[in-house]
Amino acid sequence: MSKIPGMNIKFDPASPLSADYLYMIDLSLPKKQDVLQYLDTNGAKPAREATAVVFHGSKNIIKEYVVGPLPNPSYHHDVTVERYKREIPLTARPTTSREYILMDIFLNRGLTPLRTLMKESFGFPLSSYDIYYEAMPKGVESGDRQTWIGLCRNEEGFDIHPVGFEILVNHKSTNFSSWHVMKILYNGQYFDSVNELKQGYEAGTVRKIIYKPVPNYASLKPRKKPTGVGPQQFYAQGKRFSVKNNNIVYLDWSFAFGLSPLRGMRVFDVRLRGERIIYELSVQEAMSVYASFTPTLMFTKFLDGSLGIGVCAYELVRGVDCPYSATFIDTFHFKDTGTPRRLRNSICVFEHDMGQPLRRHFSEIVYNSYGGLSNSALVFRTITAIGNYDYVWDFIFYQSGSVEAKVHATGYIASSYKFNNSFQFGHQVAENITGNIHTHFLNFKVDLDVLGVKNVFQTKDMEFVNVSLPWMPERHAMIPQLVEAQLKTEQEAALRHNTKTPRYLHIASNKTNRWGHQRSYRLQVFSNTGDHLPESQAEEKAISWARYKVAITKHKDLEESSGSLYNQNDIWNPAVDFSKYIEDNEPIENEDLVAWVTTGFLHIPHSEDIPNTVTVGNGGGVLLRPHNYFDEDPSIHSADGVYISPGTEESCDNNRVACLAQETCSPVLEPFTYHGFS
């Protein structure tokens, strides 16, 4: 990028907003067909390429360039119009670190005339007005760059310490001297300028907030000294998975992994017993829509994929975020950093006993036996701390051939100052603090390749039918009947949240198992989402993927993601409108299919969200389950199986657990006993 003729690219995050600034470098994914030819038919290895995102402050536009081949690039191509069908205006850019620094300077200078108010109302010392949360998107129409900023106390968990002062700043210009205040909210009253508020405050015509110190209810420091350590896991025979470069092998599973700076974690080429099941499984977007009496949250719609989900995957804490014995992996990114940034221990991998048997049966009728299998699975995890919220992202690989993608939310709620006793938009959760109602929608991309790329989308469900009893024809009974369908087009297969959806959704091959049934994988979605933003709203196009519980599209390399870097700040004219993927209504029979799965939950904050939200009950996900894919449950071949019959209760032949206490690497254990047949 530094050698391109005619470009004066800056790399330093402190560069002026008017500079041509290299904001991000990311992997440019190769075309799927080229990858499959390389992996499956010994075709040529695709060139490794990067995407470079440049904020051309000198021209007020944003460009994306593909640069390659790596590691010694010799070419670059402007791919902006190819990817987005138009140019991207500079106002669509995320807020850079330089812009945040300038905003801090602007606030501390601009609010200096209010130092008496700040001291008397909030206890703020002079020039200490740079702890805040901000509204997104930045404005009310395309081209805007004006942000409501809510001041907060300088405390741990400042997100739930708003003070009742919000200010609207126009920072559209790349010339800092042109920035200006558009509006101020103080104690529920709006003012057009700093001077208007200052004069009213000094004249006594403004309802005042009187500062009262409060203890920090947001602190996560334990209320009493920790003295306990919870149960720990250990590997009795060593770890049964291996990590080499970006590849993981676990029992019969193998896959490649990565961490996109924008989208977060993803895996590719997922195989079971050497057979590809999934080409790509990836996080796509995390979105929330808020409500409030105050402007900073009233209009806010957070699109975390535009902020960067992957760049917020910070170091994981051993023994809390992941089991103590987990394997940890570093990641790197180049996003508004000027140089690659290393995030230590930002991925963890561990095998986990899920706490219930994967399958089991005890029989004392006719034949005495016990057979079972513990549910040990591989967990691939990141945790992203994006502003106030922390998301725990898991991909889980089960011995039954299932793969689960799920997410749980924790962290701090976003909140607003309570100006009155109306709780239309949430509950009071602390002194003068309202926890605001909001939605969480999470989107996954699931590119299943079931025995190849020629797949169909099928649904299965049940209905009751009235049948005559064969042995008593005059009698009838209502019994459930299998109902099956195969959907033919993308619009048919765009399954909205507000309509009844068949309970079984399948990506299927035309190939059959031993019993003549089409081999398939089922998409089983776990979700408790709130209502989606009405489509009449201009901002809805940027989050149109959230209309659908599941949407099936024909694979296209240019339909790589459901969102973009630019959707947050040009939400009214988004660079990626997911509904366009469905609008062309392409046929989906015997095609390479992609499932876009949306899950999530409605969050009505309550007092137990203080100090912060717990993961229990706050999440969702999708389970990818084999359905007639195998001739039998593949876990029957697991080396972990246990089988006990009368007389073998203490034998290790079909029950390795019976001799676990004798293993040299085991901690001190009680001896194994079983009396089920007594």
Image (cartoon, grey):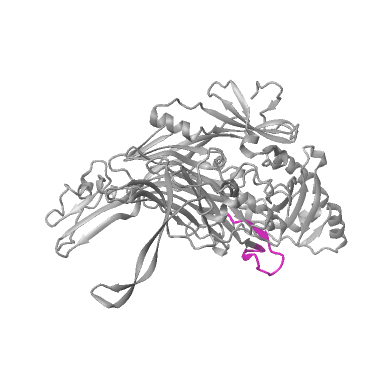
- Residue at the extreme front of the image, as rendered: 473
487 vs 610, nearest the viewer: 487
125 horizontally vs 551: left or right: right
- Give coordinates of residue 6: x percent, y percent: 71, 22
- Give coordinates of residue 134: x percent, y percent: 68, 50
Q: What range of the chain is rendered magenta?
A: 411-433
- Give coordinates of residue 590: x percent, y percent: 43, 44
* Count of numbered tags: 0
495 horizontally vs 41: left or right: right
Residue 225 visible at all:
no
Q: Is residue 626 magenta?
A: no
Residue 209 appears in which quarter of the rendering?
A: bottom right
- Give coordinates of residue 238: x percent, y percent: 30, 39
659 horizontally vs 442: left or right: left
What residue is shown at x 63% (from left), y 61% (from top)? 436
What residue is shown at x 57% (from left), y 22% (from top)? 73
